[in-house]
Image (cartoon, rainbow, N blue to C red):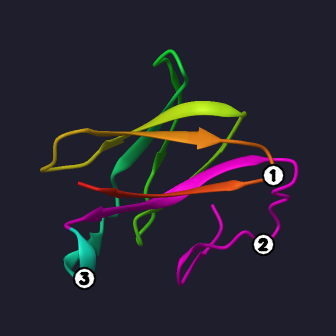
């Protein structure tokens, strides 16, 4: 993963014209009360619900996947929280930014 910057992860060194990028942040709470969740796990499930990959969130709650074009599900698992599923559409040449509140 790249280092965290204000507003999300840096895309320095990532050729977004050749990659479908799904990235974001896991937070606990909402709005100004939201705080980043480090050490959560975000799973990437394909269109049929099959497990594809999993990454832990960084100290700032950020995560990133490189995926193929199409519909994906992000499943977030964190202590003291129910699993949260979020559907996201990825396409080469763009970055799908997602914030997941648990």
Q: What residue span does the magenta drawing correspond to?
A: 1-29
Sequence order check: which comes first, mark 3 or mark 1?
3
Instruction: Residue 74 in the image: state x and y as whole percent.
Output: 44, 39
x, y (%) of residue 33?
Answer: 19, 79
Relative placement, left or right, of 80 versus 58 is: left
Instruction: Bin the neighbour count of mark 2 within 10 Å (Cα to Cα): few under 14, some 14-19, many 20 and up.
Output: few
Q: Secondary structure at mark 3?
A: helix
The percent position of residue 92, horizontal first and vertical second, equals 79, 44
First along the sequence among labels 2 and 1 = 2
Side of 74 where 5 appears, left or right: right
| Residue that mark 2 sits on | 12
Determine if the magenta segment contains residue 6: yes
Query: Which sits in the foreground, 4 or 27?
Result: 27
Q: Which mark is residue 93?
A: 1
Q: Are marks 3 and 1 in contact (CB under 8 Å)?
A: no
Instruction: Identify the secondary structure beneath mark 2.
Output: loop
Q: How many marks?
A: 3
Q: Residue at x 54, y 32 (%)?
A: 72
Q: Is residue 63 visible?
A: no
Query: Callout 1 environment at 10 Å: few (<14), some (14 to 19), or many (20+)?
Result: few
Q: CA distance from mark 2 to mark 1?
A: 15 Å
Q: Earlier in the sequence, mark 2 or mark 3?
A: 2
Which residue in the structure is indicated by mark 3? 32
Closer to the observer: label 2 or label 3? 3
Q: CA distance from mark 3 to mark 1?
A: 31 Å
The residue depicted at 53 percent of the width and 79 percent of the height is: 7
């Amino acid at each position: 993963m790249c280092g965290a910057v204000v507003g999300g992860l840096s895309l320095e060194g990532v050729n977004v014209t050749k990659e479908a990028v799904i990235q974001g942040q896991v937070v606990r709470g909402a709005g100004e009360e939201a705080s980043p969740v480090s050490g959560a796990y975000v799973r990437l499930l394909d269109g049929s619900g099959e497990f594809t990959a999993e990454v832990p969130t960084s100290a700032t709650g950020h995560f990133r996947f490189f995926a193929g074009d199409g519909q994906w599900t992000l499943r977030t698992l964190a202590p003291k929280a129910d699993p949260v599923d979020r559907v996201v559409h990825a396409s080469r040449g763009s970055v799908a930014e997602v914030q997941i509140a648990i």
